[in-house]
Amino acid sequence: MSEAQFNAFNIASGNVEPTSLHPLFVGILIALLLLWSGWGLLHVYQGYATERITEQGLIRFVIRTVLLIVISLFLFTQ
């Protein structure tokens, strides 16, 4: 950030450092991803239990969800 951007951010945020907000937003992102994946897994499993979703669909959802979480952790927690 340039000096002007940094000063504007400090004024707007009430003198909070941008580096101190990063863990907060990463934590919120991870919490939302885990909540979404739990909700999705619950619904996919219910569909699988009533035979509306095939085993291949269940496995595909789990693989995509795990990849989404791993990639998000890799990109945003550094």
Image (cartoon, helix red, strand yellow):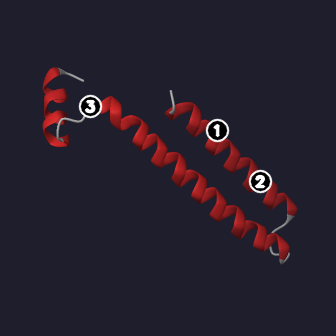
For image coordinates 41% across by 43% down, the residue present is: 25
Q: Which residue is mark 3?
A: 17
Mark closest to the chain's N terminus, 1 or 3: 3
Instruction: Tell me whether circle 3 and circle 2 mark residues in contact (CB < 8 Å).
Output: no
| Sequence-wise first label, 3 or 2 | 3
The kind of residue tagged 2 is Arg
Q: Position of residue 19 (x, y in %)?
A: 34, 29
Label of residue 60 in the image: 2
Q: Residue at x 58, y 58 (%)?
A: 35
Alpha carbon distance from label 2 to label 1: 15 Å
For residue 11, side relative to residue 66 (left or right): left
Is residue 59 depicted above or below 40 in this figure? Answer: above
Which residue, given by chain and number where applicable, does mark 1 sit on?
70
Please report contact status of discs 2 and 1: CB closer than 8 Å, yes or no. Answer: no
Total marks placed: 3
What crowding class fits label 2: few (fewer than 14 Cα within 10 Å), some (14-19), or many (20 or more)? Answer: few
Q: Residue at x 81, y 75 (%)?
A: 52
The CA span between labels 1 and 3 is 27 Å
Sequence-first disc among 2 and 1: 2
> Which of pointers 3 and 2 indicates the residue nearer the eye?
3
Which secondary structure, mark 1? helix
Secondary structure category for the residue under label 3: loop
Nearer the observer, disc 1 or disc 3? 3
Where residue 15 sits, quadrant-wise, is top left
Q: Nearer the viewer, residue 40 or 27?
A: 27
How far across and down, in percent of the image, does residue 3 sit? 15, 21
Q: Which quadrant of the view contains residue 22? A: top left
Q: Amino acid at mark 3?
A: Glu
Between marks 2 and 1 in the image, the one whose residue lies nearer the viewer: 1
